[in-house]
Image: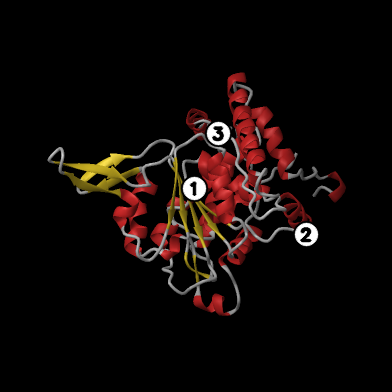
């Protein structure tokens, strides 16, 4: 047996996969490299633009950009006053896309979201008046205040990018991106989102409270109560669709994919979870990791990309066991325990 001093050293995860990129990607073209660099540039421009209004919160902003690049949707959940709606509006302002906002209330009906056919007396025929969902970027504010019937009106649109009204199916504009805000504190007059709809969101974003430094900078920036800040668009629909195509082509090695599948499958057997992540969650985690890699200027996914995004992608898709809930555990705690117990793929020299 070799002595400990003679064993090959274990390299860090980043070192391993950087080396992997050099040895297995010799055939990648310079065009491919420039493509991922363009995604990195676009993401940086959008992030910087949003941070003209939102102080800090780089991680939350990056998660929203990842959802956009994956043709997914983002659920922004946190206590009141943490900037959920402000971030969503700042992000939409950074995109040169059609934008609509729906303020969800208990009396909102599906027709208020999808649109309605009305009789035009002057033409003696029915005409369709599109609802706010026929936009490229949709802000669904306080989505849990609407009834389940109205919430369900979003299901087909979020999954299929189409809407069916009176038996007629219409395609939605591309890109189509939904950002929904949710207040988890107030329970009166709200309707919890069912698991089927939560599963339609690529990831869940928690804004969190700002640090003391960030809050001080916010107070300095917004001194007047009547101040309004607007941002200029830095990305066109064509830019976004081109970036989405680049993300689709980012490589996921079999070893990284196996690591991802171990994490997802572990949610289905974890003792703290009554319901594990679905196959749709596996796809979502892979796509999100591809977007993270492209935003970092890489055309390959690292295990760290998967690990960093697992909580945001999986925590809202699993259901905590009642006994774990009584012990004060959360879905985030359960995912963190799975990540700690799942071996990260490494190699020895």
Q: Position of residue 281 (x, y in %)?
A: 47, 52
The one of 262 and 169 positioned closer to us in this rendering: 169
Return the mark for residue 250. 3
| Residue furthest to the top | 30
Report the residue at 44% width, 60% height from top: 143
The reply to whether discs 2 and 1 touch (Cβ–Cβ < 8 Å) is: no
Q: Which residue position holds label 1?
A: 284
Return the mark for residue 212. 2
Secondary structure under the numbered disc 1 in the rendered image: helix
Secondary structure under the numbered disc 3 in the rendered image: loop
Return the mark for residue 326. none
* Disc nearest the viewer among 2 and 1: 2
Tell me the crowding category of disc 1: few under 14, some 14 to 19, or many 20 or more residues within 10 angstroms, Cα based. many
Q: Is residue 338 left or right of residue 174?
A: right
The one of 117 and 41 positioned closer to us in this rendering: 117
Tell me the crowding category of disc 3: few under 14, some 14 to 19, or many 20 or more residues within 10 angstroms, Cα based. many
């Amino acid at each position: 047996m070799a002595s400990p001093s003679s064993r090959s050293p274990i390299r860090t995860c980043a070192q391993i996969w950087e080396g992997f990129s050099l040895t297995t990607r010799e055939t990648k073209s310079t065009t491919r490299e420039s493509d991922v660099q363009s995604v990195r540039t676009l993401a940086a421009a959008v992030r910087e633009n949003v941070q003209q209004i939102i102080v800090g919160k780089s991680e939350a902003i990056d998660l929203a950009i990842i959802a956009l690049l994956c043709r997914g949707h983002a659920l922004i959940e946190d206590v009141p006053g943490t900037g959920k709606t402000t971030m969503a509006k700042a992000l939409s302002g950074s995109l040169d896309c059609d934008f609509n906002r729906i303020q969800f209330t208990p009396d909102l009906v599906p027709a208020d979201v999808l649109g309605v056919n009305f009789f035009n007396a002057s033409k003696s025929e029915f005409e369709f008046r599109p609802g706010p969902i026929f936009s490229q970027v949709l802000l669904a504010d306080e989505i849990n205040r609407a009834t389940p019937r109205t919430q369900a009106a979003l299901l087909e649109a979020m999954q299929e990018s189409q809407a069916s009204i009176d038996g007629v199916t219409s395609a939605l504009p591309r890109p189509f991106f939904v950002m929904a805000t949710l207040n988890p504190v107030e329970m009166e007059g709200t309707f919890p989102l069912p698991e089927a709809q939560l599963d339609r969101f690529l990831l869940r974003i928690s804004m969190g409270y700002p640090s003391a430094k960030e809050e001080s900078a916010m107070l300095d920036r917004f001194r007047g109560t009547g101040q309004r800040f607007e941002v200029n668009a830095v990305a066109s629909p064509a830019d976004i669709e081109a970036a989405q195509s680049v993300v689709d082509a980012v490589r996921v090695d079999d070893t990284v994919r196996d690591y991802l599948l171990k994490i997802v499958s572990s949610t289905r057997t974890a003792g703290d979870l009554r319901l594990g992540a679905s196959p749709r969650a596996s796809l979502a985690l892979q796509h999100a990791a591809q977007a993270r890699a492209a935003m970092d200027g890489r055309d390959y996914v690292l295990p760290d990309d998967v690990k960093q995004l697992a909580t945001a992608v999986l925590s809202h898709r699993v259901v905590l066991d009642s006994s774990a809930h009584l012990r004060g555990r959360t879905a985030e705690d359960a995912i963190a325990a799975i990540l700690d117990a799942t071996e990260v793929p490494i190699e020895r020299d």
